[in-house]
Image (cartoon, rainbow, N blue to C red):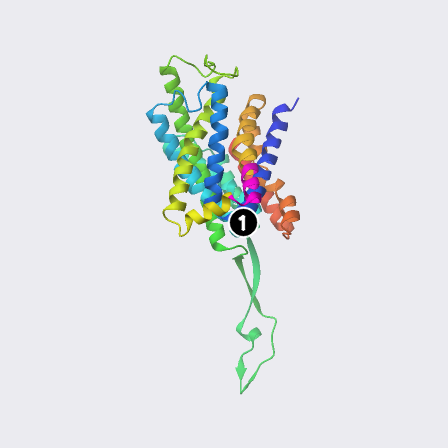
Amino acid sequence: MFKGEIISICVALSWTVTALFAEVASKRIGSLPLNVCRMAMSLVALALTLWLTLGVPYPRYADGSTWFWLLLSGVVGYVLGDYCLFKGYILIGSRFGQLFMTLSAPTAAITGFLLLGEKMGALALLGMVVTLVGIGMSVLSKQATPSPLERGTPIGGGYVSKTSARSSVWRLKLSPKGVLYGCGAGMGQGIGLVLSKMGLQHYHTSLLAHGLTPDSVPAEAVLNIPLSLSMPFAATMIRAIMGIIGFSVALLLFTKGGKQQLNHAIHDRKSMLCAFCSMMFGPFVGVSMSLLATLYTSTGIAQTLMALTPIFIIAPAAWLFHQKVTPREVLGALISVAGVSLFFV
């Protein structure tokens, strides 16, 4: 009983751990070196997984259309999205970085409407508003601005006494650049998700062309696992291939001292341990458990529970990184996650 719900909560906890490890590593070695290392590690783990499930260490049965859409998804979701996410971790921390990831739900809904013709009901539109309100509550603060009289106005060589006249304005309490990176991460995740869905649809068509179905098990597979469960890992590998290419080009060709940064990162044991843990709890354990969760409960319930990461991360981030958390920020995170849940009602 409640097996799927328990697994979904474990996924949210897994992604919380991923974000915390990623923040530590990002601040030590930088966003690009970390992502190059993570992509390399994930390719090794995915190759082993595909060898066990498909009998070969590469995305078997994927045709040209599948590769095109999944590589495009890798550019948007991994190269742009993850770059923004980890830069955001450096500037605003993993707690707020994960809060902005709730933007992936409305972004995916809009992208699905534009590219796939998916319907957007009234609840989806309400969910967008609620999500934005929750984020706004967390990142904006009302600050009093002193009037000219309160600051003191020169009169006859002196200053009048201060008055209590004040005006209040809403201001960002985070780095504006960090907020932009956070928005880019959430939007990249949402668009990448839709592009991945398009790639998986082509993958399904390619399987049928090979005389297979999602329930088929390749004869060469080591484990008796149907293609429906191994296809997402194959799709993730294609995205990861694009990811390591994009991050490597950005680091080695367009970043001053990129080779030295990568060499430093590889020899930083603590960073490599954090990168490995981030990879294992994120794209590897997190993805596999999220697939398993949908087998035991509805997709809507699973997605809603897995979106709890911005709430779960508040306490450990405050403890590990000595961050001050206000009741307003907690309420904002709760409202933002509530907005996400409306997309799956």
190 and 218: which is toward the camera = 218
**In the picture provided, is 272 more to the left or to the right than 111?**
right
Q: At which x and y percent is residue 270? A: 58, 44
Total tally of numbered discs in the picture: 1
Q: Residue at 46% across / 18% down in the picture?
A: 55
Q: Callout 1 environment at 10 Å: few (<14), some (14 to 19), or many (20+)? A: some
Q: Residue at 44% across / 49% down in the picture?
A: 260
Q: Amino acid at mark 1?
A: Arg
Q: At which x and y percent is residue 226? A: 49, 16
Q: At which x and y percent is residue 92? A: 54, 51
Q: Residue at 54% across / 41% down in the picture?
A: 272
**In the picture provided, is 178 more to the left or to the right than 72?**
right
What span is colored magenta in the figure? 267-277
Image quarter in which the C terminus is found: top right
249 and 174: which is toward the camera = 249
Q: In this view of the protein, can residue 269 be seen by the observer?
A: yes
Query: Mostly what secondary structure, the magenta segment?
Result: helix
Say above or below: 296 vs 320.
Answer: above
The residue to which callout 1 is attached is 28
Image quarter in which the N terminus is found: top right
Q: At which x and y percent is residue 81? A: 45, 41
Can residue 308 be found in the magenta stretch? no
Can residue 270 be found in the magenta stretch? yes
271 and 62: which is toward the camera = 271
